[in-house]
Image (spheres, helix red, strand yellow):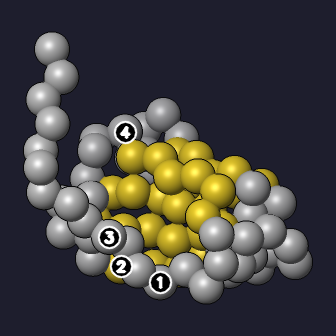
Amino acid sequence: MWTVDSTKQVLVGHRDSVLMAVYSPDGHRILTASWDKTARLWEAETGRFISELKGHGDRVLSATYSPDGRYIATAS
């Protein structure tokens, strides 16, 4: 059974389109990948910005967590 929370959270910070978003394995963080050449980390519960991951020379097309949530991989 799925429950839906009517509370909406907007993650503000990327300077271009977001291609994907994924929850951390523990559900506490969200990782986003964007055309602005960055990936960003957010607190899932509050939407608070945590960190910007820079370094790609082109759009970040994909981002994911390792199964234990300790590492992040991005692809451009």
Find disc 1 in the rendering and name its residue: 13
Taking the spot 69% from the left edge, 51% from the top edge, the residue there is: 62
Disc 2: which residue: 49
Q: Which residue is mark 4?
A: 25
Camera-nearest residue between 6 and 51? 6
Residue 37 x, y percent position in the rendering: 74, 76
Q: What's the distance in space between the residues labelled 3 and 4, CA to CA?
A: 21 Å
Q: Earlier in the sequence, mark 1 or mark 4?
A: 1
Q: Earlier in the sequence, mark 3 or mark 4?
A: 3
Hey, which residue is sitting farthest top in the picture?
Answer: 1
Count residues near mark 3 (Cα–Cα under 10 Å), then give few for <14, some for 14-19, many for 20+.
few
Nearer to us of marks 1 and 4 is: 1
Crowd band around label 1 with a 10 angstrom C-alpha radius: few (<14), some (14–19), many (20+)? few
Q: Position of residue 50 (x, y in %)?
A: 37, 77
- Which label's residue is closer to the chain start, 1 or 2? 1
Which mark lies nearer to you, 3 or 4? 3
Whether the residues at callouts 2 and 4 have beta carbons within 8 Å, the answer is: no
Q: CA distance from mark 1 to mark 2?
A: 8 Å
| Left or right position of 1 against 23 | left
- Where is residue 58 drawn, in percent x and y? 86, 73
Judge whether residue 5 can be spotted in this image: yes
User: What is the distance, in whole Å, between disc 3 and disc 2 at their CAs?
Assistant: 11 Å
